[in-house]
Image (tube, rainbow, N blue to C red):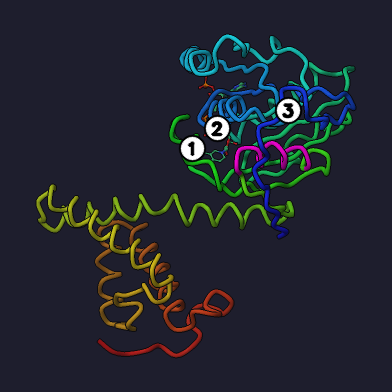
């Protein structure tokens, strides 16, 4: 993994950035396909930043998101219903769900066949630039650029974006321009190999997506055990806050407590049975996470490089 700091560029004059791969000196025009959480936030961020891209047009099938986009971006940006209605552009951002990227790339390749090759980017953390193969086959430069941020609303994304790690992978010209564009937003770019994307994206899932599941599970089990619902929420929030505080202050291994960290094997076994009796997936998750927790506690440096069950179990209170 090659990290590169995308030092934020100062806002460029509207026609000052000669970074269009097709050779002309105007700022590359950007079309955004998909006005969802990511497409709309990035379009607005680039519009406000005045960086290397000129946000030109956007398309989205659903009327509600088109209306939101028009209200946010104003009349200078064309908001269309279909891909076919978008004007020519030097850069196309396919900000559609992962399952639709290849299909939209294919449709765009058909629509733009015979015109000057451009660049296409998508934002999936898991999928690679190969999803854009139909465009690459027509001479386009393609890349995946994953901003490692949970995009919720455009306002929140705009407030939170500076400092976001943006993982780049794909063709060199597309990576170079993407680095400029995301750098202009305060992004911190790093280069990834295509083969590393599954682990890279899996890490983000561990760091972000599973936390709400863990918290919701705890709340529900407290309720099941007779704790009043309001108190279950208070317990949940208190544990999450203190666990996050401890993790940030001490690091993962030192912040880890509980039966797996202590090596209380009898408790682990009986507790695991109770979880499995409540729900089969809960039992499996409890066993798997307890195994990982024990390995982390025993060997903070090499815990994930040694097989399950290796190393001495500690004992104690
Ligand atoms: N959300 C995040 O936190 C996050 C973070 C980093 C990367 N990403 C990546 O960013 C990409 C977009 O995710 P998202 O969260 O923004 O998804 P999203 O909120 O579901 O938005 C996707 C948008 O694409 C539109 N769309 C679907 N099919 C289309 C088509 N054929 N042509 C044009 N537009 C189409 C949808 O329109 P309708 O609403 O009308 O159906 C929707 O507005 C994904 O690759 C995702 O992996 C997401």
Residue 250 location (% of width, % of height): 39, 72
Mark 1 packing: few (<14 Cα in 10 Å), some, or many (20+)? some
Of badges 2 and 3, the one in the foreground is: 2
Cβ at disc 2 under 8 Å from ligand 1: yes
Instruction: State which tag comes first along the sequence, 3 or 1.
Output: 3
Residue at the image position 16 percent from the left and 53 percent from the top: 232
Magenta stretch, main secondary structure, is: helix
Tell me if residue 172 comes above or below residue 2 in the rendering. Answer: above
Residue at the image position 32 percent from the left and 64 percent from the top: 243
Mark 3 packing: few (<14 Cα in 10 Å), some, or many (20+)? many
Which labelled disc corresponds to residue 105?
A: 3
Residue 198 is left or right of residue 284, and the answer is right
Q: State which quadrant residue 11 falls in.
A: top right
Tell me if residue 78 comes above or below residue 310 in the rendering. Answer: above
In terms of depth relative to the viewer, which is nearer, 108 or 254?
254
Of badges 3 and 1, the one in the foreground is: 1
């Amino acid at each position: 993994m090659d990290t590169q700091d995308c030092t934020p560029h100062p806002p460029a004059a509207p026609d000052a950035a000669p970074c269009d791969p097709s050779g002309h000196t105007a700022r590359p025009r950007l079309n955004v396909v998909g006005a969802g959480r990511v497409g709309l936030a990035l379009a607005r961020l680039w519009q406000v930043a005045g960086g290397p891209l000129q946000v030109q047009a956007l398309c989205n099938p659903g009327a509600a998101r088109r209306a939101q986009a028009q209200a946010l971006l104003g009349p200078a940006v064309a908001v269309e219903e279909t891909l076919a209605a978008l004007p020519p552009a030097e850069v196309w951002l396919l900000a559609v769900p992962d399952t639709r990227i290849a299909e939209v790339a294919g449709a765009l390749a058909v629509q733009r066949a015979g015109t000057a090759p451009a660049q296409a980017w998508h934002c999936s953390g898991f999928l690679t630039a190969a999803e854009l193969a139909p465009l690459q086959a027509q001479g386009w430069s393609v890349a995946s650029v994953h901003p490692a941020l949970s995009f919720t609303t455009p306002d929140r994304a705009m407030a939170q974006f500076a400092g976001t790690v943006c993982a780049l992978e794909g063709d060199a010209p597309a990576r170079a321009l993407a680095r400029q564009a995301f750098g202009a937003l305060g992004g911190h770019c790093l280069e990834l190999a295509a083969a590393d994307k599954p682990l890279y994206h899996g890490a983000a899932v561990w760091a972000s997506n599973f936390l709400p599941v863990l918290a919701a599970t705890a709340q529900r089990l407290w309720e099941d055990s007779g704790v009043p619902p309001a108190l279950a929420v208070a317990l949940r929030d208190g544990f999450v806050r203190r666990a996050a505080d401890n993790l940030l202050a001490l690091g993962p291994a030192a912040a880890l407590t509980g039966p797996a960290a202590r090596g209380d094997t009898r408790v682990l076994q009986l507790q695991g049975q109770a979880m499995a009796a409540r729900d089969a997936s809960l039992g499996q998750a409890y066993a798997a996470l307890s195994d990982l927790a024990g390995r982390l506690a025993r060997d903070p440096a090499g815990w994930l490089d040694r097989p399950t069950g290796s190393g001495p179990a500690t004992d104690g209170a």
